[in-house]
Image (cartoon, coloured by chain):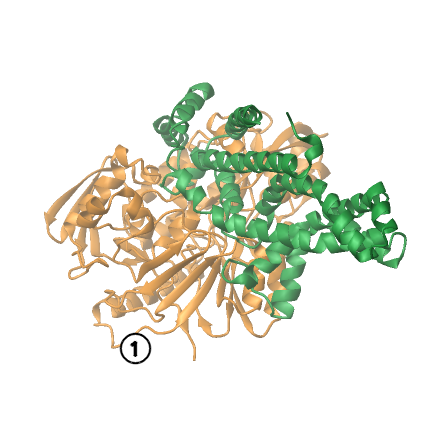
Chain colours: A orange, B green
């Protein structure tokens, strides 16, 4: 681990914690009552406000505005207290959360240990058919210690539980209200503890958030936020240019430079935690040979792909650990673009004339995968690897992965919502969904990391993981793209590295 | 007549059923929603578990039978994505789509009839040339491109109209125009050619021989007869307009059936896709039926006995 980075990350973390502590315990200073109205244009709207039936990141990154989790993230992405003031591991399989007192749901119900138990029981009850149950599958049960202490018991040790029970999958419901209102009502009339109340929602039309003036962190700055789904990129950008909305996300990369020249607008970009990569089926020759896998990595000019397809708005990654993740080590350098080295490695491996291979890509998912795939195949061709392209619709590619019918090479991306490399790497080495790389040494390293509760002690251990993965090259390592936010000059907003569209700090100038 | 209508209604039911079968199998053949519904970190085992819970691992015909049994009671199932009954979800979006398509249709007719008549009465002249030029451009221009150009011009540059969304009358202008343009072009050509035909009919010659003024001849004798084929074409085009509305509703985020359906298709939200196909197919079939009956009423020559 580069000592410089460690210092920087630590500094950020300390800053974040201090800021959080000041905000949380220092008795928030008297702030002005919420005022004004902000209008926002987003590419998608939530499918539901029922936190257990959310589909897709677009929902999960938004509904946190009306709910709270036990934990939260600050603007740097550090885990900070929310409805839990603190948490600790009692033993390998029990996490204890000390809950915040005096928090009320929007309808006035008290938040306490009952709420936590009810919420987690509901999320893990098969009858709920929770879409997020896979993310909470380690939970065995929830025990109430006293009204403000809960123990969450896991089936196997789960070091990520405090992250899971944050804004991702731990948004808290009121037992009384949820039981009384029924499932269909929760989807459209949520009752959380969050900074905003959902005032009205006409699907595909507009959604209106009203400030929760008695929010436990202090009232939000803006009184009303009108969210309009504007699906078409050109129309969304046009709405910002025409002054119909104050903030839009995302902006297509091709438009960023043009909008940056507009002095009425402010464009902010942030590296989104989506890790693009090409999965290599290491079981099948010639990919069982590490030299061939490394050759693939030398063969692709990722920087040029970033420059041409993303107009430079992206970050080249050396491995599958993204820039915002815990323990990202920039001293682990990416493979340079070196086609002659690639050819040499292929010759050493016994393929001086290259070989033929199938390459899967798809359209219709949250991000563009087919154009980068085309570019990568072009580069492979240059070193003699003749790739035959199969392009699928995303939803028909899914079943192919489940049935392990993917080609030896396929492009994919995973959003590291947990900002934790181990979560990503475990998923990518699961031995299913077309991903078949296994390594005992890697497993051992990850197991050791997962037994370390303190993130500061986990972080440096990831350097060895990144070195090992880079050398083993079970993937063609690619990049993460920037997410761009456009705003009018009157808006004060800083996007968060975990993609959450957290509107609480949003302010209006003048 | 009653037997005719009964026969047509029976055919309509068969058509709707056929459309539902085709759409059901087409959507299912291209995959199921398991992977879209679950968070990205779900493992293969968790995806399989989800498919079993929702019955997506049953054979297709079993799933279709299950669907059909409920559908005959008007129950298309709970939307996988929205957690609400799918038929009311779609029905709630029908007014927006009707507002858009009917406005587009009226706009197209209002422009096409005078343009077509003028072209016919000034056949070969500059007005005819201009009208046919407009029609050619209108039929060739892709409506999604036109939509985005209109947004840039009317909303961003000139600030005259809102960029997208639904609200007052100003909101409907651009999306309706984008849908209307192709139909307008088609109808202009149709009106022109039928008018030319009518103007050479015997009864028109008779009218002229009686010494009636040309304007009167055109408007009272030729035009009403020229409009009969227009009714058929407008009726038949309604299906295409609904299809076009899918694209235009998406560009303008117009909260109608088209936008909702396209999202449901992309997300493999089968209950909503099925409910939507049912409603749209029913609408098209009913309108075609109405047009046929209207035609019988308008044109005594083809009245069935």
Residue drawn at 38 percent across, 58 percent down: A77
For this view, does B205 lie left or right of residue B254? right
Q: Position of residue A384 (x, y in %)?
A: 71, 34
Residue under pointer 1 = A32
Query: B248 or B100, which lies in front?
Result: B100
- The quarter of the picture where residue A183 lies is top left
- The quarter of the picture where residue B269 lies is top left
Q: Position of residue B173 (x, y in %)?
A: 60, 59
Query: A258 or B303, which lies in front?
Result: B303
Tally of numbered tags: 1
**Residue placed furthest toward the bottom:** A510
Do we see residue A379 in this rendering? Answer: no
**Residue placed furthest toward the right:** B124
Do we see residue A439 in this rendering? Answer: yes
Q: Secondary structure at mark 1?
A: loop
The relative height of residue B120 versus residue B16 in the rendered view (above or below) is: below
Query: B32 or A262, which lies in front?
Result: B32
């Amino acid at each position: 681990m580069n000592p410089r980075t460690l210092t920087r990350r630590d500094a950020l973390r300390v800053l974040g914690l201090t800021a959080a502590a000041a905000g949380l315990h220092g008795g928030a200073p008297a702030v002005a009552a919420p005022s004004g109205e902000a209008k926002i244009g987003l590419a998608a709207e939530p499918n539901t406000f029922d936190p257990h039936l959310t589909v897709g990141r677009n929902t999960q990154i938004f509904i946190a505005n009306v709910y709270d989790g036990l934990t939260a993230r600050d603007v740097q992405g550090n885990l900070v207290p929310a409805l839990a003031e603190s948490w600790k591991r009692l033993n390998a399989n029990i996490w204890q959360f000390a809950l915040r007192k005096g928090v009320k749901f929007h309808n006035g119900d008290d938040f306490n240990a009952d709420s936590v138990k009810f919420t987690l029981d509901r999320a893990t009850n098969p009858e709920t058919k929770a879409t997020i149950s896979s993310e909470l599958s380690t939970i065995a049960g929830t025990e109430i210690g006293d009204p403000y202490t809960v123990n969450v018991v896991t089936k196997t040790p789960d070091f990520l539980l405090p992250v899971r029970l944050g804004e991702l999958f731990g948004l808290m419901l009121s037992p009384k209200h949820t039981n009384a209102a029924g499932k269909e009502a929760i989807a459209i009339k949520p009752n959380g503890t969050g900074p905003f109340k959902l005032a009205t929602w006409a699907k595909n039309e507009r959604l209106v958030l009203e400030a929760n003036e008695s929010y436990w962190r202090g009232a939000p700055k803006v009184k009303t936020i009108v969210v309009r789904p504007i699906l078409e990129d050109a129309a969304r950008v046009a709405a910002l240019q025409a002054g119909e909305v104050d903030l839009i996300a995302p902006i297509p990369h091709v438009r960023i430079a043009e909008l940056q020249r507009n002095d009425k607008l402010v464009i902010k970009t942030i590296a989104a935690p989506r890790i693009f990569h090409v999965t290599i089926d290491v079981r099948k020759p010639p990919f069982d040979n590490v030299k061939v896998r490394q050759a693939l990595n030398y063969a692709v000019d990722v920087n040029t792909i970033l420059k041409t397809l993303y107009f430079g708005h992206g970050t080249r990654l050396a491995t599958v650990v993204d820039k915002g993740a815990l323990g990202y080590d920039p001293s682990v350098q990416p493979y340079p673009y070196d086609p002659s080295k690639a050819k040499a490695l292929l010759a050493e491996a016994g393929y001086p004339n290259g070989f033929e291979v199938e390459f899967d890509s798809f359209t219709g998912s949250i991000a563009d995968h087919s154009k980068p795939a085309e570019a990568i195949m072009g580069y492979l061709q240059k070193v003699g690897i003749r790739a035959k392209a199969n392009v699928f619709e995303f939803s028909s590619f899914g079943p192919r992965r489940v049935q392990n019918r993917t080609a030896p090479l396929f492009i994919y991306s995973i959003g590291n919502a947990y900002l934790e490399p181990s979560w990503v790497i475990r998923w990518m080495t699961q031995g299913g969904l077309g991903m078949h790389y296994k390594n005992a040494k890697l497993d051992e390293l990850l197991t050791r990391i997962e037994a370390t509760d303190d993130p500061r002690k986990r972080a440096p251990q990831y350097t060895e993981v990144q070195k090992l993965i880079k050398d083993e090259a079970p993937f063609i390592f690619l990049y993460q793209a920037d997410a761009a936010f456009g705003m009018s000059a009157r808006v004060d907003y800083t996007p968060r590295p975990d993609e959450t569209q957290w509107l609480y700090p949003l302010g209006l100038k003048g | 007549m009653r037997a005719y209508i009964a026969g047509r209604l029976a055919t309509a039911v068969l058509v709707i059923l056929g459309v539902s079968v085709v759409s059901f199998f087409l959507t299912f053949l291209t995959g199921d929603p398991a992977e879209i519904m679950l968070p990205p970190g779900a493992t293969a085992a968790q995806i399989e578990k989800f498919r079993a819970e929702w019955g997506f691992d049953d054979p297709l015909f079993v799933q279709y039978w299950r669907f059909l049994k409920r559908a005959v009671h008007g129950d298309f199932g709970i939307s996988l994505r929205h957690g609400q009954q799918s038929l009311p979800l779609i029905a709630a979006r029908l007014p927006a789509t009707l507002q858009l398509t009917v406005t587009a249709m009226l706009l197209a007719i209002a422009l096409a009839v005078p343009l077509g008549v003028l072209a016919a009465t000034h056949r070969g002249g500059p007005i005819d040339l201009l009208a046919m030029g407009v029609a050619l451009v209108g039929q060739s221009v892709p409506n999604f491109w036109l939509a985005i150009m209109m947004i840039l011009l009317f909303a961003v540059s000139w600030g005259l109209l809102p960029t997208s969304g639904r609200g007052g009358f100003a909101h409907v202008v651009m999306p309706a125009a984008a849908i209307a343009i192709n139909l307008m072009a088609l109808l202009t050509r149709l009106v022109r050619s039928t008018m030319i035909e009518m103007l050479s009919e015997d009864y028109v010659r008779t009218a002229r021989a009686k010494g009636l003024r040309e304007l009167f001849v055109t408007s009272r004798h030729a035009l009403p007869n020229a409009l009969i084929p227009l009714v058929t074409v407008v009726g038949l085009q309604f299906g295409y307009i609904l299809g076009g509305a899918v694209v235009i509703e998406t560009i303008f985020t117009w909260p109608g059936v088209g936008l909702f359906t396209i999202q449901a298709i992309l997300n493999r939200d089968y209950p909503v896709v099925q409910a939507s196909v049912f409603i749209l197919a029913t609408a098209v079939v009913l309108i075609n039926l109405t047009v046929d009956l209207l035609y019988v009423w308008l044109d005594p020559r083809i009245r069935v006995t």
